[in-house]
Amino acid sequence: MRYSQDILDEIRNRLDIVEVISEYVPLKQSGKGHKGLCPFHQEKTPSFMVDSERQIFHCFGCGEGGNIFSFIMKIEKVNFPEAIKILAEKAGVQLPADKNQDDKVYRERDFILRLNDITANYYQRNLFQEQGKNAFQYLAKRHFKKETIQKYHLGYALSGYEHIISLFAQKKVQASDLIKAGLAVKSKKTGNVIDYFRNRIIFPIMNLQGRIVAFGGRVLDDQLPKYINSPETPVYSKGKHLYGLFQAKKSIRQKNQIIIMEGYTDVLMAHQYGFENAVASLGTALTTQQIDLIKRYADEVIIAFDSDTAGKNATLRSLNLVKKVGVKIRIISLPAESDPADVLLKKGEKYFSTLIKKALPLIDYKLEVLMQQYNPETSEGKVAIVRELFQDLNGINSHLELLTEVKKIAEKLGLEEDSMLKDLSRFRKGNKTLPNISAKNIAEETHVNAEKILIGNILQNRENIKKIFSELDIEYFTVREHREILSVIQEFYKRGEKIDIQKIMDKLGNQKEINLLSQIMMKDVVSSDEESFKRSINAIKKYRLQEEIKKLDSKIKKVQKEKKEITPEFLQDLRRSQELYKELEKQK
Ligand SMILES: [Zn+2]
């Protein structure tokens, strides 16, 4: 399906590229623009730039670039229409109805999201009415403020079997749809359709856009199971969401740090105490999908799981995953048998801040846990601990950092640093280390750079088009992508339309062309001074002359070498070659 230019403009007007990219890449203000680590190649120093004024991005490491649509296509690995759908949803722009399968899926999802909204409102109303008094008191006793309850849409599912069923019966919603949405379930005993959540405090789970995709329910007493979550539905799959992320997004980006906790109540309490970058994993260990999500938002992850054994095991399992994606991790050690909510309530925010500050890096935390697990007094224990740590030590790229870590471990375990290093190097030899991939830095040829300068000049001032094309032909541009860009620009110019970089990007079919265009705009090769403009035109002319001379010369040489008869054509080539040489002289 093709979308009209109006729709593309509407989406663009409502979204800011910096905001959209920030959901995937932590960005920092840098000069006029924003800077971050490129999501399209591995790098340690940022070369990924976002220009909010022109609404484009470009990576000077790998060359990827474009506008908001190209970004979504690349990062979500989707085609253009799918990227538009994603962005339209973000922007709240309604796309014209499409009668294909996609649309059916979309409508179904939208329907379930609306059912969830109605349900969440209903649950919340319960909390503030007589029948929800015990639930409200439960929350109040645990020091949840009314604002928190409202901001996170907490609610209460009454006891009884048919509250949701009858709520939606009035609205003529089928029971089968309620089952599909995970709001009702067929009773195994009676075969009747009954409410899914009964007599539980309700914690709505939101997606990145703030729509409610599922619910978590907690009992008010010590009954088991303590928590149940919505089943998988067309809008919710386990392990894909993080509780509180929608509300935490902004703070996570600002702090470039995310705190991961285990439970709903931990997150709510953390937010209430000003730690608004906290989210919950909605299960014990983190999943790879959640880690991908985390990686989009922050460079540093603080893990604050419960201090019981299950929490520790979850931490270790999560760490192995997080480590692989190359985010910085530190782990908070909570006092024995406590969770973050307890700690905040008992000791306050200052204490929790110090816990964050003192959170241990991965290896130190592991060493601490391993020393409890194995006996560090025995040599078997020492070997076991060191063996487990080698995996992590192996992942350290900086030699200095490695030496520091080894020294620390050796000291704690009473081992010799040197022998540990020797063992490690033996361990390493069994492993292939990945070579560093760095973008090739090939100096650009003068004429190619000149082509870019001219394209940049046109984009800054449409009147330059006339000047350029009075001197040069599109064919003079040697880079195919530059010629494509120019012919799109020419089309706009001929139709008397504004030459708009966003629209040019929409028109260009080829990603390589879009990459080049964003590079041209961001590289500041664009200078409006007359001198560089002239120099660029000359550089292109000169290169063309040189190329033509090269061709003629090789032709002439060939004739001379083969001692062929002198033809009028040969004489003409010879004359032309001399002319070109003279012209080239003039250029210098
Ligand atoms: Zn890159």
Image (tube, grey):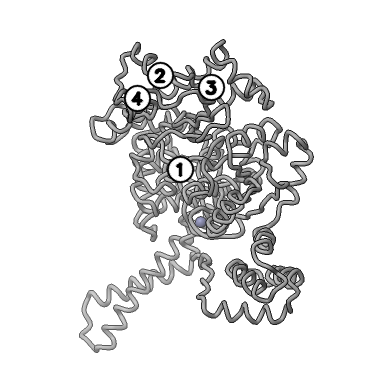
Position of residue 42 in the picture relative to residue 268 (left or right):
left
Nearest to viewer (mark 1 / mark 3): 3
Residue wearing tag 4: 178
Query: Of marks 4 and 2, which one's residue comes earlier in the chain?
Result: 2
The mark that comes first in sequence, 1 or 2, is 2
Across and down, in percent, residue 91 comes to: 45, 30
Q: Which mark is residue 289?
A: none
Task: Measure the alpha-carbon separation of dots 1 and 3.
Answer: 23 Å
Q: How dense is the environment of label 1, judged by Cα within 10 Å: few (below 14), some, or many (20 and up)?
A: some
Dot 4, crowdedness within 10 Å: few (<14), some or many (≥20)?
many
Q: x%, y% of residue 398?
A: 65, 69
Mark 3 to mark 2: distance in Å?
13 Å
Q: Earlier in the sequence, mark 3 or mark 4?
A: 3
- Residue matched to label 2: 164
Q: Are marks 4 and 1 in contact (CB under 8 Å)?
A: no
Which residue sits at x=60%, y=44%? Answer: 260
Residue identifier under label 1: 240
What is the CA distance from the residue labelled 4 to the residue labelled 2? Answer: 9 Å
Q: Residue 99, position in %: x, y?
A: 23, 30
- How many numbered marks appear? 4
